[in-house]
Image: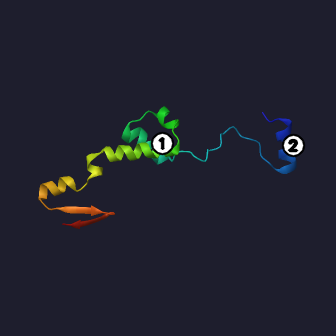
């Protein structure tokens, strides 16, 4: 239902009344991040919904850092081949 003030603002100023959909907050979580937290990490949707963006980013970073293959992708390959590699500033070089 539209009140008198909203009706007047629409007629006189061209301002459309609210249509029932809540505006997206500026700090809304990206859908891909929500999906990763709920499906990859296994977090409850309610917990994710209450997170600030910074908290959600920290949670996914903590998850990926806790994964052995992400923390050191060359470790298992290095052990199996006997080759020594060094990673510095995102550059991989043979030692």
Circle 1 residue: 55
Q: Is residue 69 above or below residue 41?
A: below
Colouring mode (rainbow / by chain / secondary structure / one colour):
rainbow
In contact (CB < 8 Å): disc 1 and disc 2: no
Element type where label 2 sits in the image: helix
Circle 2 residue: 8
Foreground residue among 37 and 4? 37
Q: Residue 62's image quarter?
A: top left
The image shows residue 17 at horizontal and vertical percentages of 77, 42
Foreground residue among 28 and 12? 28
Residue 87 relative to residue 23: left or right: left
Element type where label 1 sits in the image: helix
Q: Is residue 5 above or below residue 82?
A: above
Q: Quadrant of the C terminus?
A: bottom left
Tell me what residue is drawn at x 73 percent, y 41 percent: 18
The image shows residue 64 at horizontal and vertical percentages of 35, 47
Tell me what residue is drawn at x 41 percent, y 35 percent: 43
Tell me what residue is drawn at x 44 percent, y 45 percent: 58
Counting residues from the N terminus, which is met first, the one under dot 1 or under dot 2? 2
Tell me the CA gap for discs 1 and 2.
Answer: 42 Å
The image shows residue 67 at horizontal and vertical percentages of 29, 45
Residue 30 relative to residue 90: left or right: right
């Amino acid at each position: 239902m539209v009140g008198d003030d909203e009706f007047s603002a629409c007629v006189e100023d061209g301002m459309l009344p609210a249509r029932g959909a809540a505006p997206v907050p500026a700090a809304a979580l990206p859908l891909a991040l929500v999906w990763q937290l709920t499906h990859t990490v296994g977090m409850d949707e309610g917990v994710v919904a209450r997170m600030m963006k910074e908290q959600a980013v920290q949670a996914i970073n903590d998850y990926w850092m806790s994964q052995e293959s992400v923390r050191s992708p060359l470790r298992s390959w290095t052990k199996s081949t006997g080759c020594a590699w060094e990673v510095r500033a995102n550059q991989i070089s043979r030692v």
